[in-house]
Image (tube, helix red, strand yellow):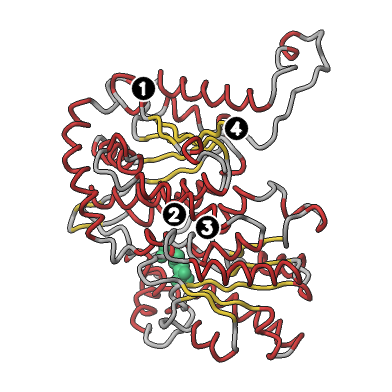
Amino acid sequence: MTNRNSLCVRVDYTNMLAESVGEHGITEAELSSMMPRMRWAVDSLRAKRDSIRWRDLPYNQAEIVADIKRTAEDIRSRCDDFVVLGIGGSALGPIAVHQALCHLRHNDLPRDKRNGPRLFVEDNVDPERMAALLDVIDLDNAVFNVITKSGSTSETMSQLLTVTRILTDRYGEDELKNRLIATTDREKGNLIGIAKRLGLKTFYVPEGVGGRFSELCPVGLLAAAVCGIDIEALLEGAAYMDALCDNEDPNANPALMLAGLEVIAMNKGANVGVLMPYADSLKYFADWYAQLWAESLGKRRGNERFGQTPVKALGVTDQHSQVQLYTDGPFDKTITFLAVEKYRTEFTIPHAFDDVPNVAFLSGHTFNELITAERSATEHAVTVSGHMNKTVILPEVSAFTIGQLIMLFELQTAYAGELLGINAYDQPGVEEGKNATYALLGKKGYEAKLHELRSAAGKRRFVI
Ligand code: PA5
C-alpha cells in the first residue's frame, strides 16, 4: 500500500506574510494575535460536531458505500448515460470530482475506452440546455439521478417533471424505477413522497449535511462510483485530512491556518479570494469551492457584512486573462494556487524548429516542466508585486488526495465561519430569489410577493 503520508496535501503560506510580499502582507503580530482565536475555533467546532454531520461522512457510511457500489455496478452494466439532475451543492461536487478523477475527455471517448457511462450533470434550467441534453443522450440506455436535499428546489423539480413525462410516455410508469434514482432527505420535501409512490431506489442526504457539504455522501458518491472512481479512497483521504485538521496548533492544522490567514486578510481589505488550480483536472474544483466559500461566508449580522468574493481562475490559461489584474491591480485579494507535483501523464515537447532559437528552447522539455515553471513564475510575479498568495500542494491528483482537498476546504470554511462569528451553514439570502420565482410562476401563497414585484417593474429605467 502507498505510504499515505507521502500523499499528504500540504500548504505553503510563505507569501501571505509581510516578510515575503511587503506592506500588504500579514505581519507576525497580526498572525500571533489571531492564534488564540484560532485555537478557540477548534474547540468551538468540536462542540458543534453533532450538528455538522458532514465531518462524520468518512467514518459512518460502510453500509451506504456497499449499497452505492452495488447500485453503481448495476448501472455500469446496463447504461451508457448517467444523468444527474440537481443544482448548487447537489451538482458542483459531482462535476468537480468527475473532472478530477476521470479521463479529461471522458464523455468523448468511445464506450470501450471509457471507464463507465457518460456523465451529464444538469444544473441549469436553460431550455436550450434541456433540449440539447435530450438530443445527445441515448434514452433507452440512460439512468437519471435526481438529487435535491430539500426535495423542493424548483429547478430540479422542473427537470424531474420533464424527465418523468418523457420516460413514462416512452416506457410506462412501471419502468421509472429502473431508470430513475432519487437522492433526498429521508423525510422532508416533495421528492421523498414521489420516490416512495413510484418505488424508486432512494439514497438519503443525512441530517446535518448541507448541500455544499454533501459531496462525500450519496449526493456525490453515486455518480463517482458509476464513473469507476474509488469512493473508499475518497473517504479515506477525507478521514486523513479530518484527523489532521482537529489539531489545536494552527501550524499542524492546514484548514485552521488557511482559515486564519484568509480572515486576517479579509480584515485587511482582501474582499476577493482567487482559487487558481494549475491542472485542468481541478478546473471545476474551483467552481465547487466558489459555492462553498461564497454561500457559507457571505452573511450579515446586524449592520455588519461578511464574506469574500471567490474568483475562479485556471493556470496557465488565465495567466493570459487575469494575472495582469493580480499583479498591477488593487490590493483587494488573495490568490490561492493549487499545485500538482506529479501529473498522471508526462508529455515531451518535440524538436521541430531547432533553427529558430526562440522556439527551439522549448523542445526537449516536458509540458509538465512548462506548466510547473509557469506556476512558479506567476507565483513570483504576484509575490514581487506585493499581493498575498499561497499554494496548496497536491502530490498527485487521485481519489485519496481529492478526498483530502474536499475535507480541507470544507474545514477551512467551517473554521472561517467560527473565526468570523457567523453561521456558515444557512443561506437566508438565497430565499428571497426563490420566493420571487414562486410568485412569478403563480405558486399559491405568494400573491403579496407578486404584487411587490409588479410595483418594482414599473420603476425600471432602460437605455433605448
Ligand atoms: O448549499 C446549499 O445548501 C445549496 O446550494 C443547495 O445545494 C442548493 O440550493 C440546492 O438545494 P437542494 O439540494 O435542496 O435542491
Q: Earlier in the sequence, mark 2 or mark 1?
A: 2
The first of marks 2 and 3 along the sequence is 3
* Residue that mark 4 sits on: 342
Location of residue 160 in the rendering, given as x and y in whole percent from the top left corner: 59, 78
262 over 71 or under it: above or below? above
Kindly tell me whether mark 4's CB lies below 8 Å from ligand 1.
no
Q: Residue at x 66, y 50 (%)?
A: 102
Q: Find out whether the residues at labels 3 and 1 contact each other: C-beta distance under 8 Å.
A: no
Marks 3 and 1, Cα distance to the nearest angstrom?
A: 33 Å
Q: 316 or 464, which is in the foreground? A: 316
What is the spatial separation of the Cα atoms under label 2 and label 1, in whole angstroms? 27 Å
User: Which residue is under mark 1?
Assistant: 386
Between residues 126 and 94, which one lies in front from this camera angle? Answer: 94
Res. 71 mark: none
Nearest to N terminus: mark 1 or mark 4: 4
Q: Distance between the residues labelled 4 and 3?
A: 25 Å
- Residue type at mark 2: give it: Gln
Disc 2, SS: helix
- Residue occupied by mark 2: 291
Please identify, in this view, whether the residue under mark 4 or under mark 2 is nearer the observer.
4
> Which residue was labeled with disc 3?
92
Mark 3 crowdedness (10 Å alpha carbons): few <14, some 14-19, many ≥20: many
Provide the secondary structure element on which disc 3 rests: helix
Three-letter code for the amino acid on which mark 4 is drawn:
Lys
**Element class at badge 1:** loop
